[in-house]
Image (spheres, rainbow, N blue to C red):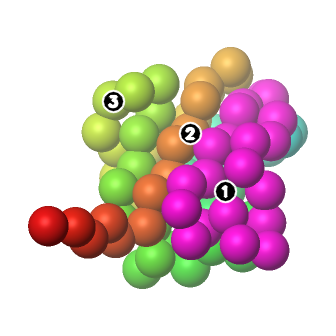
Amino acid sequence: MRIKIKLFASLRQGRFDIADRDFPDGSAIRDVLKEISVPEKEAHIIFINGRHADPGSVLKEGDTLSVFPLIGGG
C-alpha cells in the first residue's frame, strides 16, 4: 500500500518533509516510524488523515500520516 508521510519540526532534520512510500498491507504506524528511523518516543503527536492516532493504529492505502515531535511554546 502507498501512504503519504509528513514530518514536522525537528523530525525533519536529516529526513524529509513529505514523502510517498510503499508499505505492506496491515502496517501499523510503529512499523513506519521504525522504517524511517523516527524513535517511537519522539513521535508525540500522530494523525492519520487529520485524526488523532497512536503507534499501534493500522494504516490503509492512500492514508496520510502526520508526525509531530513534542511541541513547546508559551
Where's residue 5, x and y in %? 67, 42
* Nearest the eye: 15 or 65: 15
Residue 45 in the figure: left or right of residue 64: left
State the residue at coordinates (56%, 71%). Answer: 10
Q: Is residue 17 magenta?
A: yes
State the residue at coordinates (59%, 30%). Answer: 64
State the residue at coordinates (22%, 67%). Answer: 73
Q: CA separation, marks 2 and 3? A: 10 Å
Task: Tell me which amino acid carries mark 3.
Answer: Arg
Q: Earlier in the sequence, mark 3 or mark 1?
A: 1
- What secondary structure is found at the residue carrying circle 3? strand
Q: Is residue 10 magenta?
A: yes
Figure quadrant of residue 43: bottom left
Label 3 sits on residue: 51
User: CB atoms at circles 1 and 2 under 8 Å apart?
Assistant: yes
Q: Nearer the viewer, mark 1 or mark 2?
A: 2
State the residue at coordinates (71%, 72%). Answer: 13
Answer few, some or many: residues within 10 Å of disc 2's Cα (few below 14, many 20 plus, some between 14 and 19). Answer: many
Figure quadrant of residue 57: top left
- Looking at the rendered structure, which numbered label has been put on residue 65? 2
* Nearest the eye: 68 or 31: 68
- In this picture, is 15 found above or below 14? above
User: Which range of residues does the magenta coloring cover?
Assistant: 1-20
Q: CA separation, marks 1 and 2? A: 9 Å
- What secondary structure is found at the residue carrying circle 1? helix
Task: Tell me which amino acid carries mark 1.
Answer: Val
Q: Nearer the viewer, mark 3 or mark 1?
A: 3
- Looking at the rendered structure, which numbered label has been put on residue 32? 1
For residue 25, say whether it is visible: no
Task: Tell me which amino acid carries mark 2.
Answer: Leu
